[in-house]
Image (tube, grey):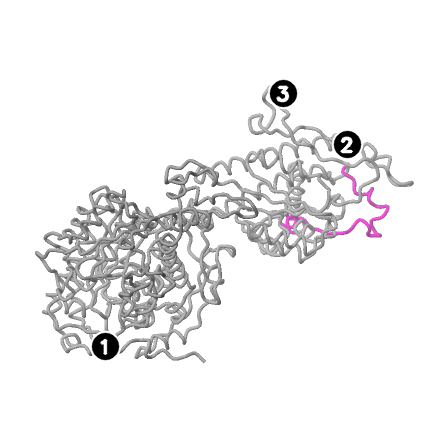
Amino acid sequence: MSARLPIVLLRLARPQPPGPPRRLPSLCRASSGGGGGCGGGEGLLRQQRLRDTQAGSSQGPGSPAPPARDSIVRSDYVVSLSHCREVIQNSKEVLSLLQEKTPTFKPVLAIIQAGDDNLMQEVNQNLAEEAGLNITHICLPAESGEDEIIDEILKINEDTRVHGLALQIAETSFSNKILNALKPEKDVDGLTDVNLGKLVRGDAHECFISPVARAVIELLEKSGVSLDGKKILVIGAHGSLEATLQCLFQRKGSMTMSSQWKTPQLQGKAACVSPGVHGISPIAEDVSLLAAALRIQNMVSSGRRWLREQQHRRWRLHCLKLQPLSPVPSDIEISRAQTPKAVEILAKEIGLLADEIEIYGKSKAKVRLSLLERLKDQADGKYVLVAGITPTPLGEGKSTVTIGLVQALTAHLNVNSFACLRQPSQGPTFGVKGGAAGGGYAQVIPMEEFNLHLTGDIHAITAANNLLAAAIDARILHENTQTDKALYNRLVPSVNGVREFSKIQLARLKKLGINKTDPSALTEEEMRKFARLDIDPSTITWQRVVDTNDRFLRKITVGQANTEKGCSRQAQFDIAVASEIMAVLALTDSLSDMKERLGRMVVASDRNGQPVTADDLVLTEAGFGADIGMEKFFNIKCRASGLVPSVVVLVATVRALKMHGGGPSVTAGVPLKKEYTEENLQLVADGCCNLEKQIQIAQLFGVPVVVALNVFKTDTRAEIDLVCELAKRAGAFNAVPCYHWSIGGKGSVDLAWAVREAASKESRFQFLYDVQLPIVEKIRTIAQCVYGAKDIELSPEAQSKIDRYTEQGFGNLPICMAKTHLSLSHQPDKKGVPKGFILPISDVRASIGAGFIYPLVGTHTSLFCPSLSPGVCSNSCPLSP
């Protein structure tokens, strides 16, 4: 029987005989004359083996003499070395191909070692260098416990810079708890239950296989041993290695058995298993060397998988079931009837790593900027802007369309898509308009959390804004009441006997042309220039803010207390989201960029007309209609981000079109007239002039337009068909009715298909104007091309501000018009497409930190505190128990 089924004995983990320690073949450059190595002579394997000279003499009395193996050992070693070179060269070539597409990519192998056994360290390092990988080595004390090792494993698991993890610890330390702490996708030694399970199940292409087990199999096959039909006795292996060997041998057609060296039946019988008969025994050095090379190969495979994960792929998203009711319940009832998915689960489904999110409760999280670095080589997706026609005071549902479109794209078309909405201000939330979470079955949930505080950013902006406002008035007070020397000493105090400038103070000195770093070296004149900002109170543009509707804060007087010593002035409160800090937050691309933008915000001018910035002082979704929101988005946001929009989704409603066609006025809180609740095709047709104008505005920027008709229950089929037909005639890429409010994403599937098709076309995006044009010309271009004005008219104050900003070097900033959203003109009651009007510019202000100039049109003061009407949403907000 044994003659027909020879036994192959594998000497794995056999106790080493006494004597000098055995060493693995070292790695070095071995070519002399240029030819005989891998990699063109670079990083060759030196063909050297330090034999265990005492191996033969260390056998105990009566032990059988080992058979002569010189010829077999030499041939095995040549096979091992040759195959090792082949594996490394192949890994190097694969990595080079990956780096052609992603030049900055370089896989990193982390090795956690407990103890001083550095036997494989040099081998791993040199093989990695030859293949083009990096290695990071974490050394722990030999006595490190299970918890200490697992702590290091968990750190490596979450380190996105590391693509593979190997453990070099005592054999007795390989507990299940340690092995299964490894992330399977980083387990390049194939030790975890997940990788072993996939191998056993037959999914070898989806897992990592033990390099040691592979090395054994490949060395046997390279040595000419046929494994098919053989009976294999695996001695000395256990755990995952034993299971992997058994599985691989069985795949080769072998029958396997396992035993340990101390098994009584083996004692005194090992001589029967002789390589000189039919078996073969790969020696430990050969296996270890090839296993090290195969681990490198696994590392390259891990890196390739990681790169593939970074590329565009469909999310493994499990969408929540939606069961729409009819009639449609209230928004709050719908929100509370659905249990949101835990945000950490959602993050994992869409490919975010655990350390890339900052969780706020169960349903909210912020995404860390580190994600941008990880995905920097990934191609941009399609950029879709949802705008709208000139709305009624009730709003036409841009947020609802946005949510419905994303529901349709993601849940029904399996297209990865995000809805990017602005955080709602409590001004409209508690006013007539209500929340900004969408509505019906197309809304953000939980709507209370979204509409009220979300992650607290608006409150933080309010605090920061008002801190700066307080600093302005405090600085004026101190400069009015202190001498130059006293002011200077307070700004640059002596701390523990040492007086020095801060970094921001050094920047101010440089700005003033004072090239000194020693506070005691400044002259009296230099101290005066440094300490005094000499702010002209009449030029202060930085206002306090509050995120609540309060009309009585539109104009206030500050500094009336006796302690302010007569430093009173007129001021005002703006709505919090109008703060320039909010604009900075929206436009910034990094923490350092945000600091720079915040520092260069201009808050006033000095008495010489020079700008005073925040740095000087502190020494210690698109909204409204396409004419406003879309124009700002393209000319400001797209300039700052560098992103090119693919499609504009233009939201329209039959109700708004009837208003533009001559229908009666629409007032919030007042029931709609019958013209809006009954079919009236003539009003719809007449009002489509506004829709046509908005389509033309989008076409000025070279972006295709898809019209989304947000359908209300009173709209008739004839009215819906008429709007879609006229929109297509006006140049829209497509026009489709949407029913997401009543049935969720399913109701926007047609819109999703239209947007997807439009986004596949080549974008011909262009800006409306060159920022190098004078400020007046940029304003005029917007007024004439977008609003349809005949010309503009500047007030003396506006002209004076323009001259000042131009002189201060801010003339090349883009323009952000502050204008009513209820008309294309400056008069809210002018509906349809007003023509021939002169657009009055009453004032011009600057947001230097954010990076734009904003003219105020007509009587519009955009940045004031809105007023509350009698019937507002805040009246129906219950107190939580």
Instruction: State the CA–CA distance, disc 1 to disc 3.
Output: 92 Å
The residue under label 1 is: 669
The residue under label 3 is: 32
Bounds of the magenta span?
Answer: 247-275
> Which callout, 1 or 2, points to the residue nearer the camera?
1
Q: Is residue 98 visible?
A: no
The amino acid type of the residue labelled 3 equals Ser
The amino acid type of the residue labelled 1 equals Gly
Instruction: State the CA–CA distance, disc 1 to disc 2.
Output: 94 Å
> Which callout, 1 or 3, points to the residue nearer the camera?
1
Asked whether disc 1 touches disc 2, contact meaning CB atoms under 8 Å apart, the reply is no
Residue in the foreground of this view, choosing between 328 and 672 = 672
Rendered position, 409 above or below 796: below
The amino acid type of the residue labelled 2 equals Arg
Residue at 57% from the left image edge and 49% from the top image edge: 186
Splitting the image into 4 quarters, where does residue 654 fall? bottom left
Rate crowding at label 3 as few (under 14), some (14 to 19) or many (20 or more) other CA atoms within 10 Å: few
* Residue 703 x/y as whole percent: 23, 51
- Residue 51 marker: 2
Q: Quadrant of the C terminus?
A: bottom left
What element does badge 1 sit on? loop
Q: Earlier in the sequence, mark 3 or mark 2?
A: 3
Q: Is residue 210 magenta?
A: no
* Residue 459 x/y as whole percent: 40, 64
Rate crowding at label 1 as few (under 14), some (14 to 19) or many (20 or more) other CA atoms within 10 Å: some
Instruction: State the CA–CA distance, disc 3 to disc 2.
Output: 24 Å
* Residue 682 x/y as whole percent: 9, 69
